[in-house]
């Protein structure tokens, strides 16, 4: 029965592991729900702000802002990589860091651009250290409880560096929240700010919709002039965009952790079933062997 005892210990160990993974799944579920609510609450404000910016760009003439400066051949770029501080979240960090490495290679080899990496999260810092890729700065205080002020501190530093011509481009590699069931890593250009083209497309779409409905709309009157308003709103739009990027990344991390822990819990349950069947077979075989030994001894007597 030595084998049965070992199997019984394994069953108890797997059950304890299943309790841990189920608890982590419940915690991740609660956190992801709270973060998804924050993302949904921030989305209308951010979208409306960007729509106003695009509208101003189409009728504002020349907007004087250092954040609109475009360099055809950027000399130096800042790449912000938003990873996680902890693991146990499936392929969240792996997929993100693979894309970040590809983007670093693309900037260095494609445009001969020097890259400063701002790494958010311990997992990304450890990965790039293993690859012996230098990191300009590591930020580890961005988690599911981070605030707007923390995002503002980091993005203000990047905006000042861009304004002082230290960087010609600022990009962010993070996981974009599309829905509760879909998130994917992507590269987002934070600076310079792109205005005009998407605004023209939005205006054309709105014009077509208005024509179809038979409605007529006139131009919006801004006071003071649109260029002045846009120049003042651009920094706010950049900060709001960066805050949303971090918020979506953190929400996606918790969703990935919830899914990973659910899969681990289900796998532990299946393992318990298989080990229980194996234990029952071993116990029955032991009982049968003991009966045969008793019968054999009785016949010998």
Image (tube, rainbow, N blue to C red):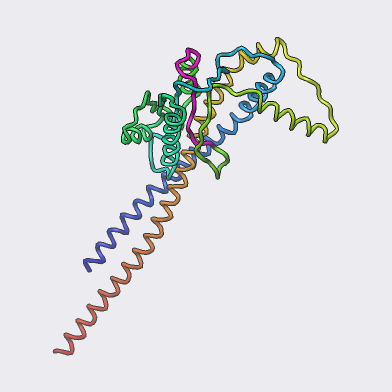
**Residue at left 58%, top 18%?**
68
Q: Which residues are magenta?
A: 162-176
Spot occupied by residue 97 in the image (x, y as percentages of width and height): 42, 37
Front in this rendered view, residue 121 or 267: 121
Is 244 in the magenta?
no
Question: Given the current orientation, which residue lies at the most extreme right position?
Answer: 214
Which quarter of the rendering shows the N terminus? bottom left
Q: Nearer the viewer, residue 129 or 25?
A: 129
Q: Which corner quadrant of the image does residue 7 belong to? A: bottom left
Which quadrant of the view contains residue 204?
top right
Quarter of the C terminus within the rendering:
bottom left
Q: Is residue 111 above or below residue 8?
A: above
Residue 175 sits inside the magenta stretch: yes
| x and y, in percent, of residue 284 in the image | 30, 74
User: Would residue 151 appear left or right of 138 to someone viewing this image?
Assistant: right
**Residue 153 spot, x, y in % from top left:** 46, 19
């Amino acid at each position: 029965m030595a084998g049965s005892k070992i199997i019984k210990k394994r069953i108890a160990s797997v059950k304890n592991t299943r309790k841990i993974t189920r608890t982590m799944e419940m915690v991740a579920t609660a956190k992801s729900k709270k973060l998804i609510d924050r993302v949904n609450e921030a989305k209308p404000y951010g979208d409306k702000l960007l729509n106003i910016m695009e509208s101003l760009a189409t009728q504002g003439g020349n907007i004087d802002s250092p954040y609109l400066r475009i360099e055809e051949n950027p000399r130096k770029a800042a790449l912000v990589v938003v990873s996680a501080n902890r693991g146990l979240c499936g392929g969240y960090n792996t997929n993100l860091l693979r894309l970040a490495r590809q983007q670093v290679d693309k900037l260095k080899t494609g445009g001969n651009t020097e890259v400063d990496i701002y790494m958010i999260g311990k997992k990304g810092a450890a990965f790039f250290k293993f690859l012996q890729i230098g990191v300009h700065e590591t930020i580890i205080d961005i988690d599911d409880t981070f605030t707007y002020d923390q995002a503002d501190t980091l993005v203000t530093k990047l905006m000042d560096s861009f304004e002082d011509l230290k960087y010609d481009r600022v990009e962010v590699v993070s996981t974009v929240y599309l829905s509760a069931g879909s998130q994917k890593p992507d590269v987002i250009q934070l600076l310079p700010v792109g205005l005009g083209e998407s605004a023209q497309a939005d205006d054309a779409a709105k014009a077509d919709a208005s024509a179809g409905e038979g409605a007529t709309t006139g131009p919006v009157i801004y006071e003071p002039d649109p260029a002045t308003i846009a120049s003042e709103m651009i920094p706010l739009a950049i900060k709001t965009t960066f805050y949303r990027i971090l918020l979506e990344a953190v929400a996606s991390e918790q969703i990935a952790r919830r899914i990973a822990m659910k899969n681990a819990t289900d796998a532990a349950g299946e393992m318990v079933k298989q080990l229980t069947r194996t234990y029952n077979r071993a116990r029955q075989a032991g009982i049968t062997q003991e009966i045969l030994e008793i019968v054999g001894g009785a016949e010998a007597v």
